[in-house]
């Protein structure tokens, strides 16, 4: 009592009081219970007395101080509640309502970036993870622009996210809860929906993976929440957008040793051919895709061609590893051209591997449009609502593999980098388990990323001068640009690994000759017809033993066909709207047949209906798709071909 009397005496010394204390009229107010303490005592009864739709109302005793806020959100026993203090008939009352049967545990604010080149503005989103009453973590709840602005949509988003979450907000409590979320985390992360290169506003140019980030001088692992601290801001990858995301190997890895092993093993497996090396070289140059698109002629679209089981899919798997994917990332060849284009829109500076591409689609406008877009980074315009266009910019390129080459057209071939994989060009015994799928190879790309664009640009320029010195290409153009990019990429890999492919310059010279010869073939009407054979057969326009006969004689593919009838069918096919091939003049075709390197002789042949027809016999073994056409028609996958013309030609 003596202490209390002393305290009261001090209260009467007005000169010692601060401005707020001067308002005190009753000294007993100094010993009143703080409101937070009172609320804490009430908390013992709240879980049993408050349920959804049944608020708990109680008179507030006189010996309790008034709260600073008449309405506020508080948490009890893993539940979120709202109290409301008001006066009724001179009595102070408190009403407590239950809002959620969980409490917010993790709050992530982020700007959602749809695509580096997208015209869509960033969207500010919230991700919530609640701790349930069972003390388990809920599934993440994503609040988009609507869900974070409308309490009804917000309630629905929470209720849908987990069967055990129940939310009951009104307009006022919802905005109060939003304010509470601000107190949990002040950090906003930038969330990209696209894996790969990050080049957005003021970000340091790097590469984003599901578990880390590469800058030119360092690797930054993600934290437990998938966020990457770049020093200025947090960035993350929206894992809900893509089924498969690239992963950066963060363990110990000797890049030089492992890359040397990869390249030397590739040499053995592919019997020293340069084509798989040019594929790898082009692929790793994708990390400079934006600069190449902006400053050079374009970026080549790799097209791997050859019969089945010759290692095309195998080298695509290596490319997938380099970019942080396993071999499951490779798309199936039955994907539509639109789906392929969308995949190149949904990743940044990553080569999209299309395995076993359906050749018969490659004759259409969609395929050709994609090649042009991938080469020059064009914007795909898609009508959105009959009035507006939805712009979908290409952010990546593609690596196709197929048994056939597409129709030979300069428009397509000078944008492709066709790489031929010959029969018996593979050494299967050299293929080891770790060669097929080694996800540690993602660290190789981190080494390539250390080179700046200025050095890479100079390397490509000097490489193209070297290629032009062969005097195969008339001048600097798309063809020399394509090979220069591929060979410069190969040079980078060899520099890092301290490796050199034997007879490399000789192999490069031979490849340039082969590449240039493809354009020469495109002038010949006979080649145009032969290149279209697989498509005509697939569409059942040309039928075996009715319009043509196909045999393997002394290791050569011999093709006999009803000349007039087949050219008539070919020209009708060319008249279709989605076919961009000119019809062939019959007189020009007849003259070209006699001079063709495929020509054997003209004969009268009988077909299924025993009718004689004026026919032409060709040896198409060395034509663009001759061997693959034989496999496709006969199904004889064990056929062996001779490299030299038969003596009885």
Image: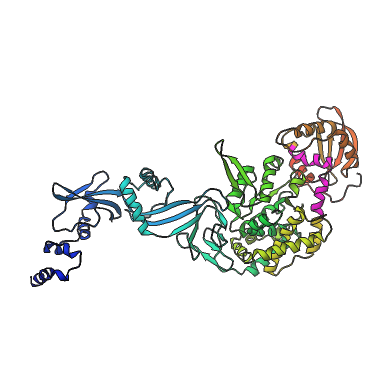
Judge by depth and name the residue closer to the eye, 515 or 93: 93
Residue extent of the magenta highlight: 513-535
Judge by depth and name the residue closer to the eye, 155 or 627: 155
Q: Tell me residue 510's x, y (percent).
A: 81, 57
Q: Is residue 228 above or below residue 387?
A: below
Q: Tell me residue 388's x, y (percent).
A: 56, 39
Q: Is residue 149 left or right of residue 340?
A: left
Q: Is residue 521 magenta?
A: yes
Q: Is residue 101 magenta?
A: no
Q: Tell me residue 240's x, y (percent).
A: 49, 50
The N terminus: image quadrant? bottom left
Q: Tell me residue 107's x, y (percent).
A: 40, 56
- Residue lying farthest to the front in this orientation: 15
Q: Is residue 395 left or right of residue 147?
A: right
Is residue 481 visible to us here? yes
The C terminus: image quadrant? top right
């Amino acid at each position: 009592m003596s202490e209390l009397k002393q305290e009261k005496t001090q209260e009467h010394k007005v000169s010692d009081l601060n401005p707020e204390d001067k308002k005190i009229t009753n000294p007993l107010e100094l010993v009143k219970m703080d409101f937070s303490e009172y609320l804490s005592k009430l908390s013992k009864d709240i879980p049993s007395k408050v349920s959804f739709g049944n608020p708990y109302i109680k008179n507030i005793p006189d010996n309790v101080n008034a709260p600073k806020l008449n309405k506020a959100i508080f948490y009890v026993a893993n539940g979120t509640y709202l109290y409301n203090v008001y006066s009724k008939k001179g009595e102070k009352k408190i009403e407590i309502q239950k809002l959620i049967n969980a409490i917010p545990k993790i709050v992530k604010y982020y700007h959602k970036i749809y695509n580096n080149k997208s015209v869509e503005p960033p969207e500010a989103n919230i991700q919530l993870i609640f701790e349930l009453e069972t003390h388990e973590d809920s599934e993440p709840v994503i609040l988009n622009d609507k869900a974070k602005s409308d309490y009804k949509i917000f309630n629905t988003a929470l209720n849908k996210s987990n069967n055990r979450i129940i939310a009951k907000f009104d307009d006022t409590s919802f905005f109060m809860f939003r304010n509470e979320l601000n107190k949990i985390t002040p950090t906003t992360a930038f969330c990209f929906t696209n894996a790969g290169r990050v080049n957005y506003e003021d970000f340091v140019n790097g590469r984003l993976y599901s578990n880390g980030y590469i800058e030119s001088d360092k690797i930054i692992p993600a934290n437990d929440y998938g966020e990457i601290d770049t020093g200025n801001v947090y960035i993350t990858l929206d894992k809900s957008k893509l089924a498969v995301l690239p992963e950066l190997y963060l363990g110990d890895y000797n890049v030089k040793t492992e890359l040397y092993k990869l390249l030397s093993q590739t040499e053995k497996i592919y019997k020293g051919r340069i084509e798989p090396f040019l594929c790898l070289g082009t692929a790793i140059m994708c990390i400079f895709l934006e600069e190449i698109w902006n400053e050079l002629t374009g970026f080549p679209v790799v097209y791997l061609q050859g019969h089945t089981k010759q290692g095309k899919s195998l080298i695509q798997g290596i490319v997938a590893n380099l970019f942080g994917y396993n071999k499951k990332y490779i798309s199936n060849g039955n994907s539509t051209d639109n789906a392929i284009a969308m995949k190149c829109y949904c990743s940044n500076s990553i080569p999209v591997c299309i395995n076993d591409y359906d050749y018969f689609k490659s004759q259409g406008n969609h395929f050709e449009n994609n090649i042009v877009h991938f080469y020059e980074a064009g914007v795909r315009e898609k009508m959105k609502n009959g009035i507006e266009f939805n712009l979908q910019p290409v952010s990546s390129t593609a690596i196709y593999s197929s048994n056939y080459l597409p129709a030979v057209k300069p428009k397509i071939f000078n944008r492709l980098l066709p790489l031929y994989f010959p029969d018996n060009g593979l050494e299967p015994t050299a293929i080891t388990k770790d060669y097929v799928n080694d996800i540690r190879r993602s660290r190789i790309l981190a080494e390539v990323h250390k080179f700046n664009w200025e050095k890479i640009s100079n390397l490509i320029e000097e490489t193209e001068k070297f290629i032009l010195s062969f005097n195969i290409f008339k001048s600097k153009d798309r063809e020399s640009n394509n090979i220069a990019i591929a060979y410069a990429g190969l040079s980078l890999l060899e520099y890092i690994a301290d490796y050199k492919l034997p007879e490399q310059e000789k192999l490069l010279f031979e490849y340039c000759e082969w590449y240039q010869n493809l354009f020469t073939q495109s002038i010949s009407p006979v080649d145009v017809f032969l290149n279209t054979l697989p498509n005509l057969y697939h569409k059942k326009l040309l039928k075996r033993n009715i319009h043509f006969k196909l045999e393997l004689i002394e290791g050569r593919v011999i093709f006999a066909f009803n000349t007039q009838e087949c050219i008539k069918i070919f020209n009708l096919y060319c008249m279709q709207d989605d076919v961009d091939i000119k019809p062939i003049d019959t007189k020009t075709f007849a003259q070209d047949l006699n001079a063709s390197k495929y020509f054997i002789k003209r004969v009268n042949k009988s077909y299924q209906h025993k009718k004689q027809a004026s026919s032409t016999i060709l040896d198409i073994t060395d034509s663009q798709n001759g061997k693959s056409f034989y496999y496709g028609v006969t199904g004889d996958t064990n056929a062996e071909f001779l490299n030299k013309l038969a003596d009885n030609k």
